[in-house]
Image (cartoon, rainbow, N blue to C red):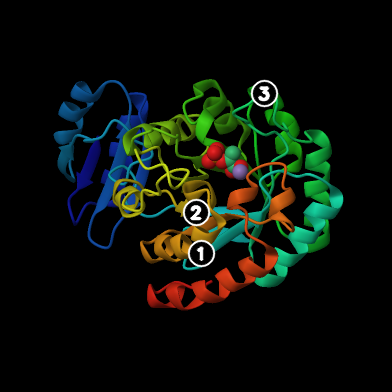
């Protein structure tokens, strides 16, 4: 529930309300607006607490939280969350660009891409070391060897990296190398994995499930936050529709919808959304124009030889051109690249 304090409520009155709620087992978030202080409270004893709090001095009203997601919702926390990964800030003025191969394949492949995307202006590197492949016969990733190469590429370029974790038993290992952990679309409702990445404390990139509603996606974020980790960035990567020309359909409307429902940053992944390298640039521009806080782009030095997701991977030259085309769009929407 949300406790709205009167415009002239004193610090003492606010403190008393917070203490009362905490004593009843509620977790609290305090938002200090220019006029009013709003206290977000999540807990079990709602009816009892509402009655007690409404009668306290300085309280204007108590209103219920309308959505099933609470901590992830903008009602509970009206100010926008910024997620920091090293020097990179998601949810600020800057549009954050994450680029790199779908999977780490070799030292040469990774270092070549890392240097090229850094030069073109990327903020972070990506690359899968544990790959969630549809077929058990497809390349599954280099595992720890891949993580070591990612760490080497970070050393060379200064770019922090995000990489996927597919199994709770690998979290400790992946977190010991990575700057940010990715939860892939296929694992968006792997609740054990969500709880455990929440407990591990590293920033999390939470991709939208292939057929997940916005509400289900925000409930997945709720699992991570309720385990104690507020550093969650959402990633719209396309959903399944009747259309087969593209691999998935980028739900552009999810970007402003999530921004009104949640305080969490949201980025877009035009690579997995379209499945076609020729569409990646145009869809990137559209996502940023719609308010995306960042982009995730698959880049490969030789897409035709990629071990995974070659058809949607762009070359370093194409990435350079994408960044150039993105610049005026970010300026037009009051952001920077
Ligand atoms: C990926 O980022 O390479 C990936 C597997 O993405 P998704 O989970 O969105 O399919
Ligand atoms: Mn991929």
Residue under numbered circle 3: 136
Q: Position of residue 181 (x, y in %)?
A: 62, 40
Q: Quadrant of the N terminus?
A: top left
Going from the N terminus, do you reach mark 1 or mark 3 first?
3
The earlier-in-sequence mark between 2 and 1 is: 2
Q: Mark 3: which secondary structure?
A: loop
**C-alpha separation, residue under disc 3 versus residue under disc 2:** 25 Å
Write down the residue under mark 2. Answer: 270
Q: Which residue is mark 1?
A: 281
Q: Which mark is residue 267?
A: none
Horizontal and vertical percent for residue 153? 80, 55
Measured in 3D between alpha carbons, the distance from the residue under mark 1 to the one under mark 3, in whole angstroms, is: 31 Å
Residue 86 visible? The answer is no
**Label pair 2/1, CB-CB below 8 angstroms:** yes
From this view, report whether residue 202 is shown above or below residue 68.
below
Q: Position of residue 213 (x, y in %)?
A: 33, 35
Residue 268 is situated, as x and y percent measured from the top left of the image, at 47, 53
């Amino acid at each position: 529930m949300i406790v709205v304090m009167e415009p002239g409520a004193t610090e003492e009155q606010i403190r008393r309300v917070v203490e009362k709620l905490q004593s009843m087992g509620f977790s609290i978030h305090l938002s200090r607006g220019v006029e009013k202080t709003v206290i977000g409270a999540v807990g079990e004893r709602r009816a009892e607490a509402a009655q007690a709090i409404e009668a306290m001095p300085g309280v204007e009203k108590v209103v219920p939280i309308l959505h099933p997601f609470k901590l992830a919702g903008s009602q509970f926390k009206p100010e926008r969350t910024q997620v920091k990964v090293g020097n990179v800030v998601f949810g600020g003025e800057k549009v954050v660009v994450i680029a790199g191969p779908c999977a780490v394949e070799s030292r040469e492949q990774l270092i070549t891409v890392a240097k090229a995307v850094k030069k073109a202006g990327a903020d972070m590197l990506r690359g899968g070391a544990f790959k969630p492949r549809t077929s058990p016969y497809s390349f599954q990733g280099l595992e720890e060897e891949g993580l070591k190469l990612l760490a080497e590429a970070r050393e060379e370029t200064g770019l922090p990296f995000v990489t996927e974790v597919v199994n709770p038993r690998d979290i400790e290992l992946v977190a010991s190398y990575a700057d940010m952990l990715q939860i892939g679309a296929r694992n968006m409702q792997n609740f054990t994995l969500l709880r455990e990445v929440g407990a591990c404390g590293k920033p999390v990139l939470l991709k939208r499930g292939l057929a997940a509603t916005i509400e289900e996606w925000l409930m997945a974020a709720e699992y991570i936050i309720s385990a104690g980790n507020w550093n969650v960035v959402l990633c719209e990567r396309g959903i399944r529709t009747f259309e087969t020309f593209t691999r998935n359909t980028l739900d552009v409307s999810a970007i402003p919808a999530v921004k009104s429902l949640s305080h969490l940053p949201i980025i877009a992944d035009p690579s997995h959304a379209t499945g076609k390298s020729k569409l990646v640039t145009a869809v990137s521009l559209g996502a940023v124009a719609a308010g995306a806080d960042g982009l995730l782009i698959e880049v490969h030095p030789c897409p035709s030889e990629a071990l995974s997701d070659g058809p949607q991977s762009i070359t370093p030259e194409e990435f350079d051109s994408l960044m150039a085309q993105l610049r005026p769009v970010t300026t037009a929407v009051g952001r920077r690249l």
